[in-house]
Image: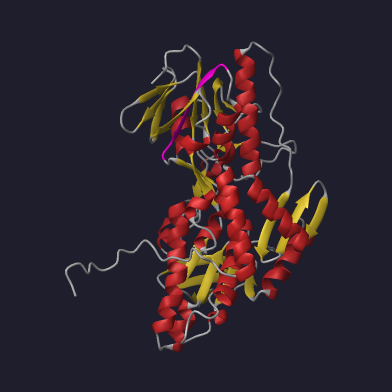
Amino acid sequence: MSDGTGAHKVVIIGGGFGGLVAAQSLNKTPTDVTVIDRRNFHLFQPLLYQVATGALSPANIAAPLRSALKKQQNTRVVLGEVTGFDIPGKAVLLKDGARVPFDSLIVATGSTHHYFGHNEWEEFAPGLKTIEDATEIRRRVLSAFERAERTTDPAERARLLTFVVVGGGPTGVEMAGAIRELAKHTLRADFRNFNPATARVIIVEGQTRVLGAFHESLSAKAKVSLEEMGIEVQLDCHVTAIGAGHVLVKPDGGKAEATRIDTETVVWAAGVKASPLGKILADALGDVTVGRGGHVPVNPDCTVGAHPNVFVIGDLASCAGTNGKPLPGVAQVAMQQGEYVAGTIVRRIKGESPKGPFRYFDKGNMATIGRARAVAEAFGIRFSGHLAWFAWLFIHILYLARFENRVLVLFQWFFNYVTRNRAARLITGERPPDTRGTK
């Protein structure tokens, strides 16, 4: 699959934040770049929760990879699934039997849901990593309201109108806030037999506070905002079982029994693990062992083991920061690593000395809780409320992959803010009855 130019061949696996930035950073360089992904689009994962609650459509937060990279004459996109690596032969192996040769390899396949040994919970508590996850959660949430409209059993209605979010990190907090606003405002006049505002939204978090990666003062403000919105926050609790129609939650410490929460809808936001491709790569390299959660340990320059031409970046990598602790699995880490690795490859091609080890520049954290409710910290400054919310809006618009996406999302957010409507609240994923031939 070489173009025969003799240019340095760079293969990038994964079109997420790290992979896309790496490819864009190699534009107009003496390289032949091939981006391989199972999906034909780049997904802006931080806004998936808005797809899951009907605020945005999937196309608003996704950009076709070919479109995003079409102006780069040295870059090609391959739609395919990687199944292995021929490290001595310097080739990536695809499921259809194809081999993609490389001189430098960048693996940036991200992460997936982590149920901590209880994979059977996935059936009842989907996570939020893909468009399919988001539309499935949207289907479950909206279907719960539809079924509540038809039932005459108060206990069944209460169960249908109870929504449990497992995990109090940014995804969990944002998801819970969006469900609460959907119930209290967007659906307020849509049903005749019940008041959607009576819906119960619960966050179950195993730590002592929500948004544990933020400063304690911001975590406290976030908890207050959640409770003001009518969301129940259960801290220092762990889920012990998830089944059809219920969740068991047990407080940490003591001898308290687990509490049963009857619910139709559970959203998993409690943990992630590295892509399975990390283990496949480690086995192929031979001198690397994946760590807890499947992450691949990398050297200070993002290379792996004794292989200077193999790089791992983003959520898949276990990369130590200046404090010795692993860097967080957030988009800005992956993007900075993508740019750094691209620069390293170009410097090598030109025969220049290495730039030095990767240094992560923390631009801050932010999380939105609801309408005009958010928390943010950047460069030692902490703020919340309207200012943090507007900052969150601006940053997320800025980092969308294409101009079209920015315009669409900006317009949709303005419309949602003025009307409190969520126009994309469509129930999809269930095949309707075939009524052809009937009258």
The stretch drawn in magenta includes residue 31:
yes
Does residue 297 appear left or right of residue 159 in this picture?
A: right
Q: Position of residue 332 (x, y in %)?
A: 65, 41
Q: Quadrant of the N terminus?
A: top left
Instruction: Give, as a single range, the part of the protein colored magenta.
Output: 30-38
The stretch drawn in magenta includes residue 298:
no
Main SS of residues in magenta: strand
* Closest to the observer, 29 or 381: 29
Q: Position of residue 362 (x, y in %)?
A: 73, 42
Q: Position of residue 354 (x, y in %)?
A: 68, 18
Q: Quadrant of residue 211?
A: bottom right
* Closest to the observer, 168 or 31: 31
Q: Quadrant of the C terminus?
A: bottom left
Say whether residue 393 is visible. Answer: yes
Q: Residue at x 51, y 22 (%)?
A: 74
Up/down of 133 relative to 253, above or below? above
Q: Quadrant of residue 50?
A: bottom right
Q: Position of residue 287 (x, y in %)?
A: 51, 25
Q: Residue at x 54, y 20 (%)?
A: 309
Say whether residue 204 is visible. Answer: no
Up/down of 221 relative to 77, above or below? below
